[in-house]
Image: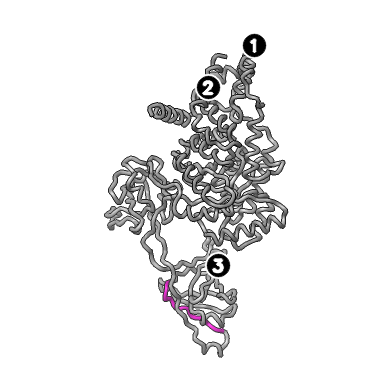
Amino acid sequence: MAEFDVIRQDMMRLTADSADLLQDIDAANQFSARNLLHYLALRSRDLRPLQTRLAAVGLSSLGRAESNVLAAVDAVSSVLHELACKEPGASALMEDIDACAGQRVLDEHAAAIFGPRPLSRGAAIMVTMPTDAATDFTLVDHLLREGMDCMRINCAHDGPVQWAQMIAHLRRAEARQNRRCRILMDLAGPKIRTGALEPGPAVIKIRPERDAFGRVTSPARVWLYAVEAPRPCPTSGAASLPVPGSWLHSFRRGELVRLIDTRGKSRELEIVAVDRDGCCLESRQTCYVESGTVLRLERNDTVEAEVASDAAVGPVPALEIPLRLSIGDELVVTSSNVPGRDAVRDSSGRVLTPARIGCTADAVFKDARPGDRIWFDDGKIGGFVEGCEPDRLHVRITRTRAKGARLGAEKGINLPDTALRLPAITDKDRADLEFVAQHADMVALSFVNSAVDVRELRSILSSLKGPQPAIVLKIETVRGFANLPSMLLEAMKSPQCAVMIARGDLAIECGFERLAEAQEEILWLCEAAHVPVIWATQVLETLAKEGMPSRAEVTDAAMSHRAECVMLNKGPYIVQAVKVLDDILRRMHGHQAKKRSMLRELQLVSSFRKTRVRDLARTDSV
């Protein structure tokens, strides 16, 4: 019982010491902010021995205390007093709020942000919009019909014209189905990426699909279009070749086009479809075509044969040749205006000049230090910084697939050990916020690292006209994870806020082996703050992209029901993925959650408390 008295006193002390943090909290979040502080005080010690003793006598082990910490502590303390045949002194100190109030507050906050959820499904479904959603109303209509509750628009892609078209399609689908769907717009943020590569040869490879015996199972498709008026290929996966528009006018199905490819091989392609924008050909042979390759049309009509039957292929894009990297290789990371290129080797394979790749953020060269870890392309390639120069880093590759990996342009770069001095809100983000404030219900702050970042977003939003969208904190860096308590308290100064567990970048930053632990801690803290959580990144990803989920993905999707919202990324089979996720979440909603958390000390809580001590000491000295 004495331990509970000490715990309670510590909870009250931290709340009193944090009066300055509570001062500007929105009225709707006052109880939630105090509860978060109570939870931080509770988790600043190792409670596992106490949990074991409580469980031995059949009492609550505090494993589900997040939503109303003070009520849970007082309830257990009261029972202990009763068992000791003493007056339940602690019960007199209990707040005038029942133990279920915290869960009700969390549910109210989730409904306010994501909208009312179906009675048989506990979590909302959020779907990332592909570019096609701007031109394909049917896609948006089907997504809404299958269970989409929130539309996510990624501001790193497309632009205001496409975003407005996506929203218009959603509003039309809502009216058609008499349903409401919320909109989240995700700011691009300061994403660090690899720079451009030196252009490779301007050649297009046309290759049919073959079986194990080399027999053609699906011919290669080629789209010919007028170089004067380019039109996109109507068939996905087809190679596109520009030719003079006048040459296309008399094409007919069944006619043949012959060419000599870059290897001197004679090849034959059959015209299988013709329309006003171009024509589609098929080839059962592999061929390599470059700018200037002569195409000869063999006409069936002898009269038509008098018309010019030859034409040269127009400009074709240069190939991007990715870097080839293996364990032990050196990679030089340079400023982004220096094109990347592969390593130069002699005839024996010995490296003469190491591979290089550009980086889009100059802060990397100012802030990185020898020994810092660095990851490329969503963690597919890893290494550490061996040396630093003002305009370049020398990186030693230590992690790839067994056979090596390829690194291309526009791939993400993560430096989990480096305190990068990057603005949380870029100039592009500021421009996009004008549109976001007018159209979105939620705005997601990417790569948020501190309460200062959150304060800046709140300041910008308050200066814009219209209703204030809810703030969503995307936790995708080690610094953001470590500063989550203070960022939550800052976000709770706004009426509505949520947290997205961006598990892709977060896994790279904290290490894949620690991702599960990190996402659990985020769920606990957000439940204590009554802040809804979005479970994001790679949910049913194989299903969305390839049409069939893996067993691990189904298990992951089942676990996601503990969050208030689950996010799906785009893919050709995204409608099917929404339908499957809806079914999984409905099934899981019918099961009782069996979870008993072991409450060891949380390191991020210790960091928060140490920061508070420093702040108070600084205030007292002033």
Query: For residue 507: magenta?
Result: no
Task: Please report the residue visible at 48 percent of the width from the left and 42 percent of the height from the top.
Answer: 455
Which residue is nearer to you in this view: 338 or 542? 338
Query: For residue 295: magenta?
Result: yes
Q: Closer to the N terminus: mark 1 or mark 2?
A: 2
Give residue 47's mark: 2
Q: Estimate the x, y position of residue 154 in percent, counting from the top left.
A: 53, 53
Single out the mark in the foreground, 3 or 1: 1
Which region is colored magenta? 290-299
Q: Closer to the N terminus: mark 2 or mark 3?
A: 2
Which residue is nearer to you in this view: 400 or 102? 102
Say above or below: 200 vs 189.
Answer: below
For marks 2 and 3, give the CA distance. 65 Å
**What amino acid is labelled 1 in the image?**
Glu
Q: Estimate the x, y position of residue 122 in percent, counting from the top left.
A: 66, 40
**What amino acid is labelled 3 in the image?**
Pro
Seen in the image, is 276 located left or right of residue 504? Answer: right
Seen in the image, is 86 located left or right of residue 243? Answer: right
Q: Which residue is mark 1?
A: 87
Q: Quadrant location of the C terminus?
A: top left
Crowdedness near tag 1: few (<14), some (14–19) or many (≥20) residues, C-alpha within 10 Å: few
Main SS category, magenta section = strand
As drawn, the residue found furthest toward the front would be 622
Task: Please report the residue visible at 66 percent of the width from the left and 60 percent of the height from the top.
Answer: 138
Secondary structure of the residue carrying tag 2 is: loop
Q: Quadrant location of the N terminus?
A: top right
Say above or below: 341 vs 395.
Answer: below
Q: Estimate the x, y position of residue 431 in percent, counting from the top left.
A: 48, 55
Give residue 291's mark: none
For marks 1 and 2, give the CA distance. 25 Å
Seen in the image, is 172 located left or right of residue 571? Answer: right
